[in-house]
Amino acid sequence: MEKVFISRRIPNRAIETLKSAGLEVKVWGSAIPPTQEELAEHTALADALICMLSDNINKDFLLKNKHLKVITNYAVGFNNIDIGAATELGIPIGNTPDVLSEATADHAFTLMLAVARKILDSNRSIGEGKWKNWEPMGFLGQDLRGRTLGIVGMGRIGQEFSRLCHQAFGMKILYFSNTAKPEIDKKFGAKKVDFDELLAQSDVISVHTSLNEGTKGIFDKKAFRQMKKSAIFINTARGEIHQEADLIEALSAGEIWGAGLDVSNPEPMSSESPLLTLPNAIVTPHIASATIDTRANMAFIAAQNVIKGLKNEKLLGFVNPIVHTKV
């Protein structure tokens, strides 16, 4: 019987799907992620691995586990995996695309509204005993109707977020992306611009790009200073895309209006981070895809990736499909 190791507890739909396919399943039982050594210890006995973004699937790990027939991330991203090394070793790598686009866009929308209307700061004031009466000038927020939205990375999530903002508030759409999206240009009157123009013109900037050498640290001190003082920065992609110390400085100095983050740099964020005390910042613990249906669907796709990988079939979410053509 072929064996599958899952590096964290995920929805039962994955386990049920795998077991119904006749596979033996072992799940990491602790809330604390396995160390590199513990992960390697378990994968040494497995034929397939379902891993998390927090697992470092680097070249050294892959060389020690080249017996694995398939590895799939329980995520749409895969920057934690050395794809080049996996491809050289002939190991299929899977992910869970498409199913979390709407949930992630919804969460970015929630963060945008919460920052614009000072929801967290006003809520804190109640607990601090500061709500004594109705205050005409208290917690004045920003209107979003007709404002300009800047999207960094116009993939599926960026497109869904653009749709929400355009239809809800009639926002004008600018985007910075490797490729033009003529269908989005036509549908939403969107415009592809360079990074500097997006920074200067946008009232809200939302990050939906992948993490790579071109995007790592792209939101730094210089970038924040190019933004409007009334600008809202949203990041639900990867924390390493922004430089956190520079963001803290920009928020503290009033160089931008506020920020809503579902990712941090580093991640997880320290409980001592100044971002958690700033009145113009809202941080959630990487939960943009955390709806019951979305996470269950992610689990199903991950399980299907494993089943298909063990059968030398194309994965549902296939990061390195060239491996399949070599089989």
Image (cartoon, rainbow, N blue to C red):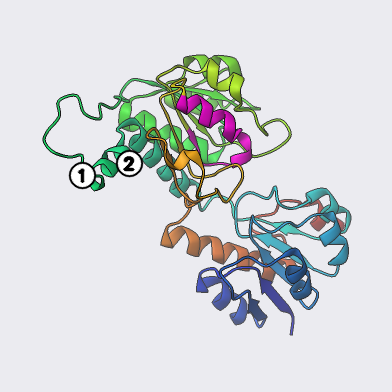
Which residue is pictured at 59% across the width and 81% down the height?
A: 20
Q: CA distance from mark 2 to mark 1?
A: 15 Å
Q: Position of residue 212 (x, y in %)?
A: 71, 37
Vertical relation: 313 (above or below) 113:
below
Q: Report which residue position mark 1 lands on.
A: 129
Mark 1 residue type: Gly
Q: Which numbered circle lies on residue 226? A: none
Q: In the image shown, does 149 or 313 lie closer to the viewer?
A: 149
Check if residue 237 falls in the magenta segment: yes
Tell me the quadrant of the picture where the C terminus can be found.
bottom right
Q: How many marks?
A: 2
Q: In the image shown, does 196 or 259 lie closer to the viewer?
A: 259
Under tag 2, what secondary structure?
helix
Tell me the quadrant of the picture where the N terminus can be found.
bottom right
Q: In the image shown, does 152 or 279 lie closer to the viewer?
A: 279
Q: Which numbered circle lies on residue 120? A: 2
Q: Position of residue 31 (x, y in %)?
A: 56, 69
Q: Residues within 10 Å of mark 2 (few under 14, many from 20)?
A: some
| Extent of the magenta region | 234-252
* Residue 310 in view in this figure: no
Labels 2 and 1: the sequence-earlier one:
2
Which residue is pictured at 33% across the width and 25% down the height?
A: 170
Which residue is pictured at 88% across the width and 53% down the height?
A: 88
Vertical relation: 31 (above or below) 90:
below
Check if residue 285 falls in the magenta segment: no
Which residue is pictured at 80% across the width and 57% down the height?
A: 324
> Secondary structure of the magenta portion, mostly?
helix
